[in-house]
Image (spheres, helix red, strand yellow):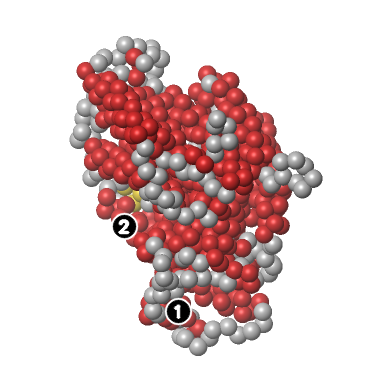
Amino acid sequence: MVPQAWYLLLSALLFGLGIAGFVARRNTLVMFMSVELMLNAANVVFLAAARDHVPARGSACALFVIAVAAAEVAVGLALVLALFRLRKSVQADEVRELRA
Amino acid sequence: MSALLLLPTVDPAEPLLDAASPLWLTLLKSVAVFGITMTLVPLLVLAERRVSAWMQYRVGPNRVGIGGSLQPMADLVKMLFKEELKPDGVPAFLFTAAPAIAAITALSMMAVVPFGGTLEIAGRSIPLVVADVDIGVLAVLALSSIGVYGITLGGWASNSKYSLLGGLRSSAQMISYELTLGIALLSVLVAASGPEFGSFKLSELIARQAESGIWNCFKLPLGFVLFTIAAFAETNRLPFDLPEAEPELVGGYHTEYSSMRFGLFFLGEYAAMVAGSAVIVCLFLGGWHFPYLTKEVAVGWGGALTQVAVFLAKVLAFLFFFIHVRWTLPRLRYDQLMNFGWKWMLPLSLLNLLFAGIGAALGWF
Amino acid sequence: MLSETTAFLLFSAIALVGAVNVVTRRNPVHAALWLVGAFLGVAGLFLTLGAGLLGAIQVMVYAGAIMVLFLFVILLLNLDTTPFEGLSIARGASLLATAATVALIAFPFARARELRAAAVPDEPELPATAGNIASILFHQYALPFEVVSLLLLIAMVGAIHLARRPRRDEPT
């Protein structure tokens, strides 16, 4: 059995890459992809932590995360489409109407 | 938080896949399944050309071999010797990977399809399937959803507007019809489930049909029709072959492909047809089961070969239906396709699922 | 045969390489494809964790549906390689903060080996088969399950409303 700590470390790395992509990139699509990466890292933690004692419950929780991710993507991509229709661009830093 | 920090146990030597069957047996079965599929594909190409000729009252290719029987071989040789054209400025890796994805996903689907029941021979019971995994039908769905990438990427990597439009259409079409496919599949799983039974394994779904003697297409006629239509859309066959609609998009996603790269797309399409038919036969037409002809446990080679023969006969019959439909129906327009998928197929599949649920709860099946 | 450790190393390498490339590729199509790779790697990890059902769902939902949708949008908008975005001071600072966060998360994770379970549930262990997951979902988690289905419905309506082209006569 691979120690759970390895899985947890891996998920921390994936999560970190997700945050890095989210803060460093300005393409809204890539930012969304980074969010997906973070959600996946969370799933790895759920399943790894549940492996030895409550595997079925861990899977159920991960299933919820996947469902929420699907909902988030649907709305997110619709937002990107609406943004592109207004701005002809998907760069997040070009949307600054509300900036003083 | 403390629940997260559970005590791990370390045992690095444990194998990931506990070998229910030895490796050589699995390899042997893979080779057999691969061989059968790769034999069916050229047969299918030949049948398609001859059947279309027959339906259109022309002769069709009849020069190579006896009655044109070696035409697929001639096609293959032609494709192998053609020049491999690559348009300017295309990403080389993706351009080559796309047809490979299309072919590999379609061929791997055959791995979870049971060709027969269990062969009892020499004190060993061998299931006649390469990988009888717990998630059987889900693996089929997963592979078919990965198959979309082959076409989408082929369209994108070609760096051509016709290809791109073909790729876009295919991704939209496949997402739309995958819903119906999944929900129709769900109705089969629901109908086959009970308080103490329920499985994703294709082999067990077939065993269930064999046990009751009634195939799922009689229990869930609507589900059968919906699944078949969705399978047509997933394999990009007429009347749903919009991704490659010749009059509007030239060759669609494979406009820029030639030689063996095109050959792989071609192979992928026909392998997907074979796999689709095999899955439909397993889910709805009783798989290897035929009344009075097959037994659940095939003792010796005779029983096993009967089962495999029954299964292949059903698959071939269904493939003929595939071809027949292609040369009978006209192509849908794109908006008609989308309307049909979302406004008819999806609600009907939900209705069918409801029917299956009620039926399972009341014990109709 | 493939041992679990080898499988873990292989799949985690795929996931990490994919994730790094998602963040660094400037062409969104390439980023999306690397993300598909990362998802497949994570699906492999789910298999090594004994959650085959989740692995299949991961491939179906993430790689098969979500990423196809992403690709669809990227191709629809015909997005090309974005110009280099540059690293401003603010962004560099936020990256540093990210690294610190990751270290904060990773530190207790790395020490998990030495920690003992404070709370092990007294119920019997259930393997993560579809049946067991379903019975948990439909009994204990029935309410969250319904809430999630409602969430998906709301998301669907919202997505349609947002992405719909406004009609001529209605104000945008």
Indicate which disc residue B28 carries.
2
Image quadrant where one finds the N terminus of chain C: top left
The amino acid type, in three-letter code, at marker 2 is Leu
Where residue A15 appears, as percent x and y from the top left, is 36, 32
Look at the picture and state if A83 lies above or below B232.
above
**Residue ID at (57%, 49%):** A88
Relative placement, left or right, of A15 versus C140 is left
Tell which of B264 and B108 is nearer to you.
Answer: B264
Type of amino acid under label 1: Asp
Residue highlighted by disc 1: B75
Residue farthest front in this picture: A100
Dot 2 or dot 1, earlier in sequence: 2
Q: Mark on residue B329?
A: none
Residue at 20% from the left image edge and 33% from the top image edge: B12
Q: Position of residue B107 (x, y in %)?
A: 42, 58
Image: B56 above or below B122 = below
Q: Nearer the viewer, mark 2 or mark 1?
A: 1
Dot 2 crowding, Cα within 10 Å, few <14, some 14–19, many 20+: few
For the question of whether residue B198 can be seen, the reply is: no
Same chain for marks 2 and 1? yes
